[in-house]
Structures are given as structure tokens and as C-alpha cells.
Image: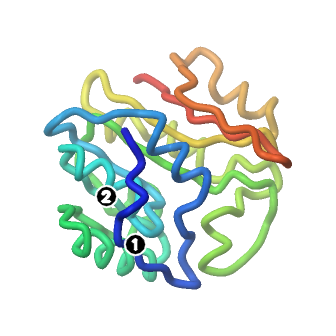
Amino acid sequence: MQYLHDLDIAKDDDVYPPSEDSILLVESFDVRQGERVLEIGCGSGIVSIHCALNGAEVSCGDINPKAVALARRNAEANGARLNVRETDIYSAFPERYDTVIFNLPYLPVEEEGLLAKAWSGGEDGMGPLPELLEKAPEHLLPGGRVIVVVSSLMDQEKLDDLLKGRAVKELGKLPLFFEVLRVLEIDF
């Protein structure tokens, strides 16, 4: 998809704002008309809004209630239809989807607070990725996919072990001064 820089996106100090990783994620994949998309960790809603404006049927959620409210407000401001719920990974989404997206917390730090949940991936940076992939088959339609952002700062051995035996394709890559971000598509 093409990233739309002219969207009306409000911000909140307790919600992860659209950043380089958000732009990379949006620009790394496309959606089909009517594709059922679930975004976990939606933050401001920027990725979900792009998906909806490109014809997908989008549900999204975040563990941060302020992010849920902000995503709803931003969707409305941009004419995007989103089904937004407060959730911890899949807890509020029993439905099945074609695509599950997560710009997950991947930094190898252990920090507390609403905003820190957006980047704090624990000691190894893996955060909720193992649970996301383990439970994905229960939430994906046949032929479904999971799209995630990963960082070179994550424990690469653990990441490789988690992805071993899975059909993984790199959709995008962004070298930054302190890390390299990659967008991965994992087929199920």
C-alpha cells in the first residue's frame, strides 16, 4: 500500500504515534477488496486505517484503552470503518481473518506503563510474538497469513527457532542507525 501522509491523525501522549516502523509496515504489503484483516496493537490506528481505505474489512485492538479511543477517533476523522476493541492479543477477537497484523513490541527492554507496552518486548524482545503465532491458526481463515515487524535487537536465535519450519517471507526492510527493522509475512 502507499502510505498516505495527509491523513488526519490525532496523537495522545500515552499512545504510540505513527513512526518509521508504521510507515514501513504499511508500505510492505497490500490488501484485497473485502479481505478480513485483524490488527493487534493498533495504537493510533494508522495501519488499520490504511487497510480500510484500501478496501479491507478491518477489526483492530490494543491493550491500551487510550489507544482504542484514539484509533476510533482517527478512523472517524478519515472516513475509515474499523471495528475497534480493547484486547490482549486475541482475547476480544474470536472471529477468523485472512490476515493478522502486529507491529509488536520488539525492543529488548522491560518497562512499565501504558506507552511502554507499545515497545517493551521483554528481556529478549520477543514480547507477545510466540503467543501470537501459537494461537494464529485458531484465528486465521484457510490460507491466512500473519504480518509482523521484527527488529535486529530481538534475540535472533530465539526468533529463528520460533520461525523454523514456517513459510516466512520478508516483505520490507529498513536499516536505522541502531537497528534493522524487517516486515515478515508468515503463511499458515
Q: Is residue 44 above or below residue 41?
A: below
Asked if residue 100 is positioned above or below residue 90 in the image, the reply reads above
Query: Which image quarter: residue 159?
Result: top right
Q: Are marks 1 and 2 in contact (CB under 8 Å)?
A: yes
Give the x, y percent position of residue 90: 39, 54
Name the secondary structure under disc 2: helix
Q: Amino acid at mark 2?
A: Ile
Is residue 115 left or right of 38 when viewed as pictured? right
- In the rendered view, does 81 fall on the left or right side of 185? left
Q: Residues within 10 Å of mark 2 (few under 14, many from 20)?
A: many
The dot on residue 62 is none
Q: Position of residue 124 (x, y in %)?
A: 80, 48
Look at mark 1 in the image and give the residue it sits on: 9
Q: Left of 93 or right of it: where is 163?
A: right
The correct choice, above or below, for 59 with respect to 34 in the image is below
Q: Pinpoint residue 176: horizontal percent, then vertical percent.
A: 77, 45
The residue under the point 67% across, 72% down is 116
Separation (CA) of disc 1 from disc 2: 10 Å
Q: Nearer the viewer, residue 27 or 59?
A: 27
Instruction: Identify the residue under disc 2.
Output: 49
- Helix, strand or loop under label 1: loop
Figure quadrant of the C terminus: top left
